[in-house]
Amino acid sequence: MHIVQQSLPAVVAALLERHPMSPGKLTLAWHMAVGASLARASEVAFDEGRRRLLVTVADGHWQREIERAAPTICGRLDGLLGPGTVVGLDVRVVPASRSRTRGRSAGALANRSAGASAPAKGK
């Protein structure tokens, strides 16, 4: 079982790299990069022009957690999506009482609440 757990990310990365960016591909890579808890607490969109992930969370706690882990997350995304695909994260707080952003475009998310940017490791 241990060998399968070690090999799975490489297999998934090989499959993901073959396909263009899509909401499903992004969701899978995000879930694998951050784990179940952070994936449940966040929503992501890809700003292709800036090569940044737009991450929406419900409160400052999750924003701080993601920003703190940004270098690790970006390193994992590099391994899954290919080097340089994602150069950083823009984390925005949108309170849970407001409408959810799932399925909205990166541009729509970028125009929402002000948030902070987290650079990728070494960028």
Image (cartoon, grey):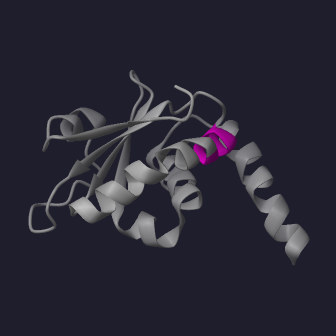
The dominant secondary structure in magenta is helix
Q: Position of residue 29 (x, y in %)?
A: 56, 52
Of all residues shown, which one is farthest toward the left?
98
Is 51 drawn above or below residue 1 in the view shown? above
Instruction: Name the residue: 19% across, 60% down.
Output: 100
Q: Position of residue 21 (x, y in %)?
A: 52, 37
Based on the picture, tell me whether residue 78 belongs to the magenta stretch.
yes
Instruction: Name the residue: 78% across, 61% down.
Output: 8
Between residue 36 and residue 15, name the one nearer to us.
Answer: 36
Of all residues shown, which one is farthest toward the right?
3
Of all residues shown, which one is farthest toward the top?
49
Q: Position of residue 68 (x, y in %)?
A: 43, 52
Q: Quadrant of residue 32?
A: bottom right
- On screen, residue 99 versus residue 67, left or right, reads left
Q: Position of residue 90 (x, y in %)?
A: 33, 39
Instruction: Name the residue: 57% across, 55% down.
Output: 33
Is 38 drawn above or below residue 44 in the view shown? below
- On screen, residue 83 versus residue 21, left or right, reads right
Is 118 drawn above or below residue 28 in the view shown? above
Q: Start and end of the magenta stretch? A: 76-81
Between residue 10 and residue 22, name the one nearer to us.
Answer: 10
Based on the picture, tell me whether residue 46 belongs to the magenta stretch.
no
Q: Quadrant of residue 60?
A: bottom left
Quarter of the N terminus within the rendering: bottom right
- On screen, residue 120 versus residue 94, left or right, reads right
- On screen, residue 9 versus residue 70, left or right, reads right
Instruction: Name the residue: 50% across, 71% down.
Output: 36
